[in-house]
Image: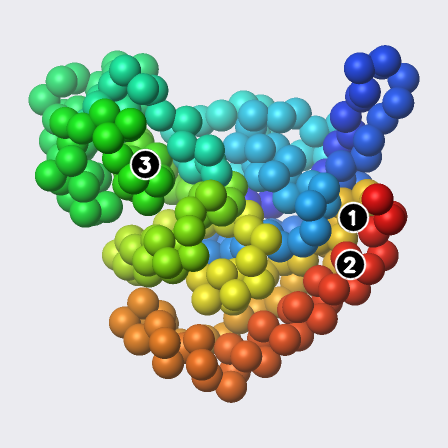
Amino acid sequence: MIEVRGISHGYLAADGLSQFQALKDVSLTIENGTFVSFLGPSGCGKTTLLRIINGLIKPTQGEIRIEGARVDGPKPDRAMVFQEFNLLPWRTARGNVEFPLEVQGVGKAERDRVVSRVLAQVSLEKFGNFYPHQLSGGMKQRVGLARALGVGPAYLLMDEPFGALDPQIREMMQLELMKLWDSDRKTVVFVTHSVDEAVFLSDRVIMFGTSPGRVVADLAIDLPRPRWTDDEAIKTSAKFIQYRNDIWRLLKHQLSSMPAI
């Protein structure tokens, strides 16, 4: 499991004196094999906490433990999928997916096998030799997802991965993600600003408040799985609508308490 223990984190301004408190005393536990979404207003520390879990940021206070071991930096058991595509423009889709495996020293034959498998998982087996500029936004995000899956992580950390996509492609990517997740039930921590996306994808929605970032609600989502087989029925069900309304009410309260711009 992932254990978040008393995490606080602040950022210093360029003058070296002013500090923005991104997170304060956040503690929570994420069980293995669950899909958990972080939801909340901009600036509430969702992405900061995700990067701390991955080991990219060292917190000001507190610690992260995964399977009992303290997180002191990134490891192959965790993979990040970012909102920005972050693809190397001089590499093909295959080359981008292959890159982290090369860094790990994986042999060419094994790299080829893994890359072919994960590109097929995200339905891009016919586009492996295309460069990023030749791919649509949805395809680029699939390449990013395939790159993360290629290293075989136990924990998939996703920072608003569909935020830059148009609404139709975003919904299709949600379905594709659910298919992949149902196939192996990795532990997923997913940052989003969309209430509907959080409810549809998640087993739990953790709501963050701001000034400073903190957990204000931890809500279990009890909707039937698999959800991708009949997503329209799920999204129009009374239970889904009730979850959405309850969470939106909490979110509106957090937004109303933010300082005026």
Q: Is 100 rendered above or below residue 140?
A: above
Q: Where in the figure is residue 43, as x and y percent of width and height?
A: 72, 42
* Residue 140 marker: 3
Q: Where in the figure is residue 260, as x and y percent of width and height?
A: 86, 48
Residue 61 lies in quadrant: top right
Relative placement, left or right, of 58 versus 159 is: right
Measured in 3D between alpha carbons, the distance from the residue under mark 1 to the one under mark 3, in whole angstroms, is 32 Å
Give the label, 1 or 3, closer to the camera. 3
Residue sticking out furthest to the bottom = 238
- Say which residue label 1 marks: 210
- Say which residue label 2 marks: 254
Please identify the quadrant where the C terminus is shown: top right
Q: Is residue 203 visible?
A: no
**Mark 1 touches mark 2? (CB < 8 Å):** yes
Identify residue type, mark 1.
Thr
Relative placement, left or right, of 37 versus 211 is: left
